[in-house]
Image (spheres, grey):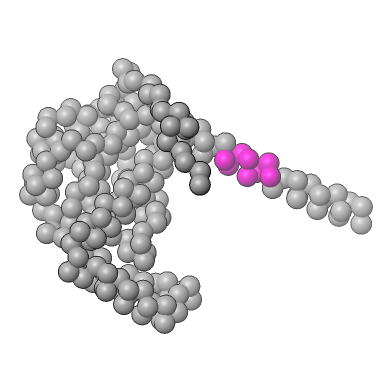
Amino acid sequence: MALLRRRRILSANSIPRLEERYMHAIQQLIESRISTNQFDSARPVSPAQIHELVRLATLAPSAYNFQNWKFIAVTSQAAKEALKDAAYGQQKVVDAAVTFIVCGKLDAHRQLEETLQPARDKGILSQAVIDSWVGMAKGSHTDNPGLQRDEAFRSASLAAMTLMLAAEGMGLATGPMSGFDPAAVSAKFGLARDEIPIILIATGYKAPGNWPQKPRKPVSDVLAIV
């Protein structure tokens, strides 16, 4: 009995230490991440790594579980050159092993019931909840292009940050890019009218010459507790 109690105490005491270790690892990822500009063009990223990065990115949250995002992994030399042209000649698009075009979708409310079916099949959501969500989403998003666009930007941005942290955890570096011509990207990569390119994420292995993480404003300048 004494041995059993000791095991229980050790097990209970190990939980805070385990949580602390996980928190420390996540903190390290966030604190070590930089926006990379110089990539090692000789080191590829495998299709399996690309698949896993996108899988993890799709675990990001979205309103109503819309999952209103799309990812294009630009890896071929021809596609890189096309994207570089649409990104105002930024060389990291070519040097990075892969550059993700993260898109937001405008018409997610139209496919919401279908999107939520796996959650019903697993017993997570009832049909009544799905019907309620679909009704609310259609009521707020139909004929509301501003809200559709806002939602597309929110979801794609959350997915993009999740992808960048996942890449950091895999030993990769990322360089998020807003400097591109959305119309040119849409035309060159065949995006549908309801798909908006939100951000580019150059991804690969660092080369020498990158800046360290730049200082941030003090928390006191950006935090209000009410």
In the rendered view, tell whether residue 183 sits above or below residue 110. above
**Residue 180 pos. (x, y %):** 15, 38
Q: Is residue 30 visible?
A: yes
Q: Which image quarter: residue 66?
A: bottom left
Q: Main secondary structure of the magenta part?
A: helix
Seen as rendered, the residue at the extreme top is 209
36 relative position to 195: left or right: right
Q: At x 81% / y 49%, what residue is drawn?
A: 9
**Residue 144 pos. (x, y %):** 19, 65
Magenta range: 16-23
In the rendered view, tell whether residue 24 sits above or below residue 115. above
**Residue 32 pos. (x, y %):** 45, 29
- Quadrant of the frame with the N terminus: bottom right
Seen as rendered, the residue at the extreme front is 226
Q: Is residue 70 visible?
A: no
Seen as rendered, the residue at the extreme bottom is 128
Q: Is residue 20 magenta?
A: yes
Q: At x 47% / y 32%, what residue is drawn?
A: 219
Q: Which image quarter: residue 218?
A: top left
The residue lying toward the viewer, choosing from 30 and 101, is 30
Q: At x 39% / y 53%, what residue is drawn?
A: 60
155 relative position to 77: left or right: right
Q: Is residue 59 magenta?
A: no
Q: How many marks?
A: 0
Seen as rendered, the residue at the extreme right is 2
Q: At x 31% / y 28%, what residue is drawn?
A: 36
**Residue 54 pos. (x, y %):** 34, 50
